[in-house]
């Protein structure tokens, strides 16, 4: 079992602590949080060991799980890596691109493994259709959330939209060509609503919308590709797959047939991939343990986390133009 320590005991940190404590792949050594009052409360309530010194905790573990506010990600990760520890770091990987790039260099120098907590990669609905999303040419995403003060220390792009940015980059096999975006601040000091259009070198276009002041929650993505439409509901964990194939010469009474202007006939049919229930956060933590133990590549590498951050920051830059 890998010895693991958690940095940060806020809302998400407590979830990580519980799952790591339950995992058969980790031995939870303890946690550190700069808020001593909160830390002692968590320790008393759940029985986890509280380390009053971050360096002492890092020295005692093999893996450091960083679940702190974004602004402190870099300092925590750098300290852990320089001590030869593997790191799991919540999204976004860091606050700035230069910080992320420095972590990439440190990862290579100290020969450690790192994974970024882009948890939607482990969403069972996305997993169910991921391999079917082959060459999407148009993508549309909506990620809407009711207002929650937690997370408003960063723009909605880094808080919410970055989930969809990472998912899109994982299925589009092309470099980003151009980005257009706009964002509006409503209640926070940073944008609460944002829309972005990402154009890729292969012609694919992605249109992303994110809001953290919606009246209802929504997390949907739609992928359009040759002869297929794939819809993923990340919130309800449901998928819809609609495909087309050449129509048979003799169509059945219930076959759905479309004919274009050139007279080409296509048959529409539906697929129902199985969506298997899981705990996405537990899965991302456990697969990281497997990557360390088996010396394989983590599902979401620090490089991929950096690429998602780069696109997110490019989107934010568009707000000021």
Image (tube, grey):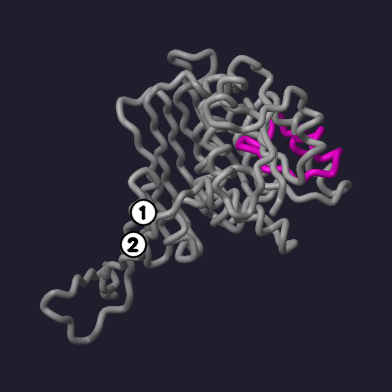
Looking at the image, the residue that sits furthest to the right is 109
* Left or right of 144, for residue 88: right
Q: Residue at x 66, y 54 (%)?
A: 289
Q: Nearer the viewer, residue 101 or 83?
A: 83
Which residue bears the numbered disc 2?
241
Report the disc number at residue 19: none
State whether residue 171 is above or below residue 66.
below
State whether residue 294 is above or below residue 85.
below
Residue 157 visible at all:
no
Asked which secondary structure carries label 2, the reply is strand
State whether residue 15 is above or below residue 111.
above
Query: Split into 4 quadrants, where in the image is the C terminus?
Result: top right
Which residue bears the numbered disc 1?
231
Looking at the image, the residue that sits furthest to the bottom is 249
Mark 1 vs mark 2, CA separation in Å? 6 Å
Q: Residue at x 37, y 58 (%)?
A: 230
Tell how many labels: 2
User: How crowded is the residue under tag 2: few (<14 C-alpha within 10 Å), some, or many (20+)?
Assistant: some
Q: Which residues are magenta?
A: 77-101
Looking at the image, the residue that sits furthest to the left is 253
Horizontal and vertical percent position of residue 181: 52, 31
Q: Choose the circle earlier in sequence order: 1 or 2.
A: 1
Image marks 1 and 2: residues in contact by CB distance under 8 Å: yes
Q: Nearer the viewer, residue 319 or 283?
A: 283
Horizontal and vertical percent position of residue 318: 58, 28
Horizontal and vertical percent position of residue 125: 40, 54
| Quadrant of the rendered image containing residue 310 | top right
């Amino acid at each position: 079992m890998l010895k693991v320590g958690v940095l940060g005991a806020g809302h998400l940190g407590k979830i990580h602590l519980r799952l790591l404590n339950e995992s058969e792949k980790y031995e939870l050594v303890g946690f550190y949080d700069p808020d001593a009052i909160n830390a002692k409360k968590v320790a008393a309530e759940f029985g986890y060991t509280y380390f009053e010194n971050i360096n002492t905790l890092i020295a005692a573990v093999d893996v450091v799980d960083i679940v702190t506010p974004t602004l402190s990600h870099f300092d925590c990760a750098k300290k852990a890596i320089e001590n030869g520890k593997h790191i799991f770091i919540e999204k976004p990987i860091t606050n700035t691109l230069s910080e992320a790039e420095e972590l990439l260099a440190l990862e290579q120098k100290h020969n450690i493994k790192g994974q970024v907590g882009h948890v939607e990669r482990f969403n069972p609905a996305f997993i169910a259709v991921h391999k079917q999303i082959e060459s999407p040419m148009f993508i549309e995403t909506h990620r809407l959330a009711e207002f929650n003060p937690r997370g408003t220390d960063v723009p909605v792009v880094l808080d919410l939209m970055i989930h969809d940015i990472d998912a899109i980059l994982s299925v589009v096999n092309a470099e980003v060509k151009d980005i257009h975006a706009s964002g509006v601040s409503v209640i926070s000091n940073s944008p609460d609503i944002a829309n972005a259009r990402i154009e890729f070198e292969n012609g694919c276009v992605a249109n992303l919308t994110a809001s953290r002041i919606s009246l209802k929650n929504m997390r949907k993505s739609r992928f359009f590709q040759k002869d297929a439409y794939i819809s993923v509901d990340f919130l309800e964990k449901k998928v819809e797959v609609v495909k087309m194939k050449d129509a048979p010469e003799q169509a059945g009474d219930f076959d759905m047939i479309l004919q274009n202007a050139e007279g080409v006939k296509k048959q529409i049919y539906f697929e129902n991939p199985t969506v298997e229930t899981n705990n996405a956060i537990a899965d991302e933590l456990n697969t990281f343990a497997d990557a360390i133990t088996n010396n394989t590549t983590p599902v979401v590498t620090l490089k991929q986390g950096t690429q998602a951050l780069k696109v997110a920051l490019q989107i934010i830059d568009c707000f000021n133009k």
